Each structure stands twice: as C-alpha cells, then as structure tokens.
Amino acid sequence: MARAFTPKVITANDLLEGDVIYFTAEDTWTRHMSEAELITDEADAQLRLLEAEKQNIKIVGAYLADAKAGPNGPEPTHFREEFRRTGPSNYFHGKQEAQANV
Amino acid sequence: MYKYNEFDEAFLAERNAQFRAQVERRIDGSLTEEEFRPLRLMNGVYLQLHAYMLRVAIPYGTLNPDQMRALALLAEKWDRGYGHFTTRQNIQYNWPKLRDLPDMLDALGKVGLHAIQTSGNTIRNTTADHFAGAAAEEVTDPRPYAELIRQWSTDHPEFQFLGRKFKIAITGSNTDRAVIKAHDVGLQVIEQDGQIGFKVIVGGGLGRTPMIGKTLREFLPQADLLPYLESVLTVYNVLGRRDNKYKARIKITVSENGIDTYRAMTEEAFLTIRGQYDGTDQQLLEEFKAHFQAPEFRSASTEAFDTAYENDPVFRAWADTNLDQHRAEGHAIATISIKAHGATPGDASAEQIRVMADLAEQYGYGELRISHQQNVILPHVHKSDLPAIHAKLKEHGLATANLGLISDIIACPGMDYCNLATARSIPVAQEIATRFDELKLEHDIGHLQIKISGCINACGHHHVGHIGILGLDRAGVENYQITLGGDASENAAIGTRTGPGFAYDEIVPAVERIVETYLAIRENAEETFIETYRRVGMDPFKAALYPEAAKKVA
C-alpha cells in the first residue's frame, strides 16, 4: 500500500519584509499559519504550489511544508516549521511578538 | 589602521549604487529571485528563517570607534537594537528589510565598511589574530598582509565563481588565535634568516569533512604572497570538483589529489603568475604598513592598577581572566566578554557597542578588535586605565570575567535564525553558561572551550572545541552529538565523537557529567581539561556518559 500523504501548507518568505508567509485557499498570503490552506491531496499540492509561484514577484522560495489539522487551523509537524511560525527562542522577536501586540 | 583612499571610497559607492539598483529591479519584477540571489549574496544579504540577514565584514577583526558606532547605528535604526558578532570576524543583523539594505550599506560605506564577499563562492573576509599588533610574542603585525589580500581578492574577476567558498586566516604569532589550520588557506608570518615570510598551510576546514590543514610551503618570501596565493586559487579553480557541493572545498581537492601533487601544480602555476606581478603590490604593502604602525604607547605609573588589583576582588577576577600580555610596557590587552551568563554568545546591544567604542576612543588608542570567539577586544590599554574601564563595563553588563572558561562558548545562530540549521545552538549555550554559573564551578574548572554548531557546516567550530556539540535533526527531533579533544590552537586537532547523541533536555546534564568526570580525575588543579583528556583518553568520559553501556560490558 502506498504511504499515506502527509498534508501540506505552502509557505514562503515575503519579498520586502522577509518574514514567513502562508498561502491561503483564496490565493492570497497570510502571516498566520492557522489561516493557511491545508492541502490534503498529493496531486493538488503540486498544482497549488505552481499557483503560489505565480506570485514570485512578491514572495521568495515557496515550498510545501508538512502540516496537520488542528482545532484552529493548520499546525506544524516539525520543529523547524514551529520556529518559523513562532520566532527565535532567545528573544521575544518575530511572529510571537507580532501576535502578542494584536 | 587602514584608511580608505579616494579610489576605495569611489569603488564602494559605485558598488553600493549597483546593489541599490539591483534591489529596485527585484522589487519591480525585472529580476527574478534566481537572478537576484547571487547578487544579494555577493553583498552579504541572506534570507534566513524569519527575515533577511545582513553580514558585514570586519576585515582582520579591526575597527575604529567611528566604525563601531556605525555598527550601533545600524542595529538601532534598521534592526532590533543589537548585532551578532560571528565566528569569522563579521557582524550580522538578523532583522533588516529589503528596502533598507541599500541604506545600511551606504551608512557602512561612510566609515569604510562593507559586506562584499561575506557570502557566495568567493574569497571571504580574511580573518586574523585578534591580538595582532599587540601580543607580546608576535613576530610582526599580520594585518598589512591581510589588507593586501582583501584588496586583491575583492572583486577579483577570476575568483568570483569558485567551486565553493574560500576562507583565509592569518597570524603573526606562534600562538595561533586565528585557527589557521582549519581554513582553506592558513598563513603564519614567520622570520627566517632575518627575512619576513609565510608558512603556508592549505586544505584545512571544518564542516561535513573536518580536516587539519597541511603545510604547502615552509617559507614563502613576503614578496611572493599574492602571486603564490593566486597560484593556489588558480589550481583550485581548475582542479576542484564542481560535480558535488560536498566535495568542492579545497580540503577535498588536496586530500583527493595529495598534497605533493597540489604543491607541484601550485609551484608550476607560480612560475607563470609570478612574472605578472611588477612590484606594485609590494609598493602598496609598504603603504599599508604605514597605516598599521603601532600607536605611541605612553609611559605612566601602573599604581592605579596595582591598588585596584589588591583591593577589589571583582576587578582582580576580571583582570586575571580577561587580560593578556601586551608587547609595550605598562600596557595590557583587555578582552571584553559579550557572553554574560545566560546571554546569547556574540550579541551586543547598540548601547553596549557605543560604550565599547567610547572606551576605545578614551583609553584604547582608538582601536577595537572582534575575535572569532565572539568577543570584543581593546588591544592597547595602559594598565592605569583598567580600573576605570572595568567600572564602565560593569555598568553596561560587559564585565563578565569568563574568558577561556566554560561559559565563554562559541555558538552559531542555529535554528533560531539560520536557514541551514538542523537544531538550535543558542539556548544550549545559554543553559550551559547558566548552569555552571549556578554551580559556581567555572573558575575551578579553568580553561575549557565549548563550541556549538547547529548543523554539520560547523560555523560554531564544534570539531575544534575541547567539548564540541553538534545539533542534528534525528527523526524530527533535536539531537546533540558530543565530541571531545578538539583543539583550535597551534596544536589543532579534530575532536572524537563520544557515541550516540543526546536529546535537547539531556545535553546540559551530559556536559555536566563530562565536567564532573574531569574534576574527579585531573591530577591537580593546574591540569586543564584538554590535558586530562590527552592523558586518559575517551574511556572515563564515555563511562560517565553511557553508564548503561558500561554495565553491559562489565
């Protein structure tokens, strides 16, 4: 039996700000992973990535990252993506700070 | 110190203007990321996990107070109020915005600093002994030669697209503080029969395949430096592998072809290349030497120092660990630790950077150094000024007396910032420093270098740490391998792995067990960790780290 497909989100960095962004189901970009489109179909994933890359004029390095469904939307499965959606652990900088200021 | 002339200023302004235009073309869509990426990398701009990162070169680790203040300005105006001093005499800014980068480079250009060739497959910033021009035992100041290499290698058309990055380090002392044997090319300035020249070491490097450099030339006359380096690079450019990124560094080229073949090919190329040099480089070198003339060291009583040393135990502890012997009478080399216990190794706030600039201006003959060990140095200080310097440092959290001790840790940015990292290194360093501070053991432990890398590329020099820690991703979880017995000095050695790695929450206790073992088996308090390790080998440490395995054998 083929291995089950791990769901994905599409993530990249914003061209001007350099910060982490996620591709939504509406073909827009969000700074919150929870608002990203969770792609559960393997064939769909590559097509969605192509769609995201159409916006390469304002984003950098889009890729498919493993994710899982959580109560408030997609969540990371690997610690690298956890750091990307949170920020560094030595200072309260990056996304964790932005979210605290909402 | 080297002072830019009109040509240098014009070159840098032109280069920065080009980069500004490149940024604009990326933003308006004329350049794709694939086209823009090599251009930004050549100017020190990376895209990391959370943001862009700008890596600024501090050539041979030397700064004047105005340059230091410019680093503070960048931190404050375009970043998050701090800068990160790296393990190769650079400073990194972790949070710049793309549109601000050209302004940052212009601000640097005004004080004669740049970010050229701090990335990419080029000749990188030439690093030097951070005590250059000050150390008591030095043969000669290596920095004029480093400046010559900087000017030769900057924008050198033949070496802009090498097979891989290329790092050169230089020292003028027998005591190696520049890790020359772990560089692509290491140079040691030596004197032979009254002539100044270089011992040339090639093929050292850390990373995936760590190697200690081999001697390519026992004595290279001073005048042959550039043609010989050019020959080394020319051979590498042709012979070096481009089919496999992991086999592209010169250490692999030398090891696959043998040092004798590499030497023969270099000498052959040198026969042709030497003739292309007409002596202009040597005229320039003489000019540079004038730039690097030592200041007029003043003579004064050291009574203020002696009094403070006798009466102030905090000052005494700092003086005992953070001062080194200066070549001029009544003077000292003062190292400022920017590794307060629990702080991020190498990070300094804009305010701290300014305080250090002011101290250099007021007391330090206008000179600062940055070490690959991620500390800041006042290379020339009269001892009578040290109590005042120490008092000022204390006010700004810069008076930590831990040089060369267990909390003076080298650590790369790791997965808190770096795109290549496989695990974090900063919090591991923070926790080790905090733990041994709590135990109040570090002065008793004595000289012990811990070096931590967050991936196999080894920016944290873990291979040459007395205790090396390498962070890896093992099945989606951070895991840390330990090596023991590495050495970054003139007795350079690659550490040996202890065995299986440790989980994130096991790594600090593991280090503690290693240190406890050392304290229990050292012959006396004078025997350092590395001496004990060399005497007894790996076994006692292994037994302490893996008690279960030891039981099975028994």
Image (tube, rainbow, N blue to C red):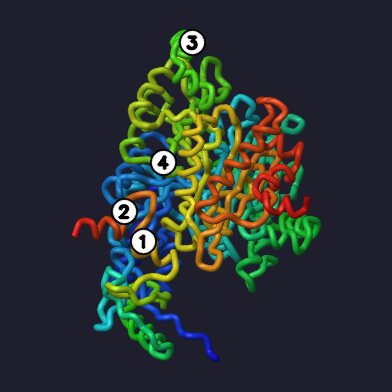
Type of residue at label 1? His
* Percent coordinates x, y for residue B445 in the rendering: 59, 31
**Residue drawn at the location 35% of the way across and 35% of the way down:** B352
The CA distance from mark 2 to mark 1 is 9 Å
Residue underneath mark 3: B310
Residue contact at pointers 2 and 1, CB within 8 angstroms = yes
Disc nearest the viewer among 2 and 1: 2
Mark 4 chain: B
Q: Secondary structure at mark 1?
A: loop
Q: Secondary structure at mark 2?
A: loop
The CA distance from mark 2 to mark 4 is 15 Å
Circles 1 and 4 on the same subunit: yes
**In front here: A77 or B384?**
A77
Residue underneath mark 1: B50
The CA distance from mark 1 to mark 3 is 49 Å
B267 versus B436 height, above or below: below
Left or right, A89 with respect to B498, comes to: left
Type of residue at label 2? His
Can residue B136 be seen at all in this image of the molecule? yes
* Percent coordinates x, y for residue B246 in the rendering: 63, 66
Type of residue at label 4? Ala
Residue underneath mark 2: A93
Label 2 CA crowd tier, 10 Å (few <14, some 14–19, many 20+): some
Residue underneath mark 4: B343
**Residue drawn at the location 47% of the way across and 32% of the way down:** B377
Left or right, B83 with respect to B280, comes to: left
* Percent coordinates x, y for residue B415 in the rendering: 45, 58
The CA distance from mark 3 to mark 2 is 44 Å
**In front here: A36 or B360?**
A36
Left or right, B504 with respect to B111, comes to: right
**Residue drawn at the location 30% of the way across and 76% of the way down:** A36
